[in-house]
Image (spheres, rainbow, N blue to C red):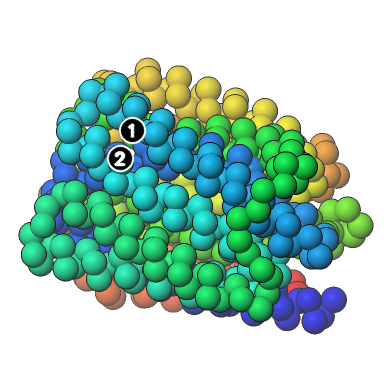
């Protein structure tokens, strides 16, 4: 157990370092792209990528989660499962690219957006191949390899972006830089998977059938979730100016970048939950509790700090044209803690084979989300879209808690919440008082205040930290 614990800790630490680099590169990319394209151009850029990403979940069909789960249980089947999943996903991916291009023709978008959708199909297909290889890294608790590939790809894309902007090559060239990064990430992934497992396309119809049957419930759930995450952007693009789409997608991009943190944790613990929930329920409960407390400890001060600093964050990161993104940014940062915890609960249910319960909850959240967006966005714009995200995430975390309690007999306690809230409130009050200082002082200073107050009220629990290491 302790050897496994050390592997998980190293796995998580390596991912943390990689994701920190990705976060920094992502922030720099946002700064360059928003300033070069402006609000309307950035809205077009983000919309083209979002259309491909939303439809792209159809190409995964739940296969990634199924492959990780199965090869965690039976490592000897790695080559067969990964190879056949890769083939199925690439075939589905080609269909998705065609579908996205046709949909872009039907929707009332400009020619540039339609061309951008086609260009975005290239990094999408390359990304499918990379994520298929990453399943091996995840199951073997070797995610440092995936982190290296991810950072290399992001850095390559950023360098290409800087070159494009310096040469003033225009909107479509900016979109094409994403393909550069995806190609580099795939090349590095293929180099690093050598020695772990033979990876290459395979065509075994029996394996295809096994993977697709197991993946359909997860795939439908992921499709519902992806529509849930992207529907607001498309509804906004149909009823409001593209400049407003740009403001909202900037705020949402910050929200997504922060979600890299819980992704690190959940990627590491999913193989463990797949094992523990079938044989060691007490260990699974400890893992869920520790992860939930960690998400509370990090997410609550982000939400509190965002309420105070959102206008300055928007100005510093994206420029003066994006200051009006402050309100949606505040709301989305407040949505982060419940989103992280609902994701954790969903992973636990999937690891236990309760995909259908997750699907039912996801469909209910999607219906609520789309209905509220259609009712509110035409009149109230991006502020309403962000408010709907917050309400939907609260709905999801409540439903996830009920399902985990009912089906897994586990009750996530969220014990740290009642200590994190007052610590974050004190931090936010001090930051508000000194809000005229620069972000370079306010952000680290606020973090120090929060940790000090949290420790003072007994919120820094050594046993929790030991559990996370274990």
465 with respect to 118 (left or right): right
Q: Residues within 10 Å of mark 2 (few under 14, many from 20)?
A: many
Residue of label 2: 117
- Sequence-wise first label, 2 or 1: 1
Look at the numbered disc 2 and give the secondary structure of its residue.
Answer: helix
Q: Is residue 120 left or right of residue 89?
A: left
Q: Tell me which residue sits at (26%, 54%) in the image.
A: 176
Q: Residue at x 16, y 49 (%)?
A: 171
- Give the structural element (helix, strand or loop) at label 1: helix
98 with respect to 279 (left or right) = left
- Residue at 23% of width from left, 23% of height from top? 108
Q: CA distance from mark 2 to mark 1?
A: 6 Å
Can residue 308 be spotted in the picture? no
Up-down relation of residue 138 to residue 392 (above or below)? below
Q: Is residue 320 above or below residue 60?
A: below
**Depth check, front residue: 22 or 376:** 22
Q: How many marks?
A: 2
Q: Is residue 460 left or right of residue 315?
A: right
Contact check, label 2 and label 1, Cβ < 8 Å: yes
Q: Residue pushed farthest front?
A: 203
Quadrant housing residue 34: bottom left
Q: Is residue 371 visible?
A: yes
Disc marking residue 430: none
- Label annotation for residue 101: 1
The C terminus, quarter of image: bottom right
Given residues 332 and 192, the one toward you in this image is 192
What percent of the width, then of the height, locates residue 233?
A: 34, 34
Percent across and percent down for residue 58 are 53, 37
């Amino acid at each position: 157990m302790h050897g496994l614990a050390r592997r998980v800790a190293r796995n998580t630490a390596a991912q943390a370092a990689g994701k920190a680099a990705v976060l920094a590169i992502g922030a720099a990319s946002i700064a360059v792209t928003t300033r070069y394209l402006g609000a309307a151009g950035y809205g077009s850029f983000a919309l083209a990528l979002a259309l491909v990403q939303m439809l792209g979940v159809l190409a995964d069909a739940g296969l990634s989660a199924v492959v990780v789960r199965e090869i965690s249980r039976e490592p000897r089947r790695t080559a067969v499962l990964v190879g056949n999943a890769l083939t199925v996903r690439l075939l589905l991916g080609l269909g998705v690219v065609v579908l996205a291009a046709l949909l872009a023709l039907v929707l009332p978008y400009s020619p540039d957006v339609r061309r951008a959708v086609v260009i975005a199909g290239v990094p999408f297909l390359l990304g499918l191949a990379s994520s298929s290889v990453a399943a091996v890294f995840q199951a073997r608790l070797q995610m440092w390899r995936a982190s290296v590939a991810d950072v290399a790809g992001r850095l390559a894309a950023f360098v290409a972006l800087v070159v494009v902007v310096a040469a003033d090559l225009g909107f479509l060239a900016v979109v094409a830089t994403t393909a550069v990064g995806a190609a580099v990430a795939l090349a590095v992934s293929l180099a690093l998977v050598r020695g772990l497992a033979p990876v290459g396309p395979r065509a075994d119809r029996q394996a295809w059938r096994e993977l697709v049957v197991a993946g359909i419930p997860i795939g439908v759930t992921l499709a519902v979730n992806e529509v849930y995450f992207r529907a607001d952007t498309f509804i906004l693009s149909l009823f409001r100016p593209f400049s407003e789409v740009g403001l909202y997608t900037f705020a949402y991009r910050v929200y997504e970048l922060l979600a890299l943190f819980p992704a690190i944790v959940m990627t590491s613990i999913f193989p463990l939950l797949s094992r523990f929930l079938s044989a060691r329920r007490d260990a699974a409960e400890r893992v869920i509790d520790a992860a939930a407390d960690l998400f509370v400890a990090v997410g609550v001060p982000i939400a509190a700090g965002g309420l105070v600093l959102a206008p300055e964050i928007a100005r510093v990161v994206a420029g003066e044209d994006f200051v009006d993104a402050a309100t949606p940014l505040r709301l989305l940062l407040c949505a982060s803690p419940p989103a992280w915890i609902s994701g954790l609960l969903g992973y636990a249910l999937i690891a236990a084979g309760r995909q259908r319960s997750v699907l039912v909850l996801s469909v209910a959240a999607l219906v609520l989300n789309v209905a509220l967006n259609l009712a509110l966005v035409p009149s109230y714009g991006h502020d309403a879209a962000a408010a709907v995200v917050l309400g939907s995430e609260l709905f999801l975390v409540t439903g996830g808690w009920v399902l985990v309690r009912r089906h897994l007999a586990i009750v996530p306690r969220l014990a740290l919440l009642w200590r994190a809230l007052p610590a974050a409130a004190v931090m936010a009050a001090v930051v508000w008082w000194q809000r005229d200082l620069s972000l370079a002082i306010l952000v680290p200073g606020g973090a120090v205040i929060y940790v000090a107050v949290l420790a003072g009220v007994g919120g820094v629990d050594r046993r929790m930290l030991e559990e996370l290491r274990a």
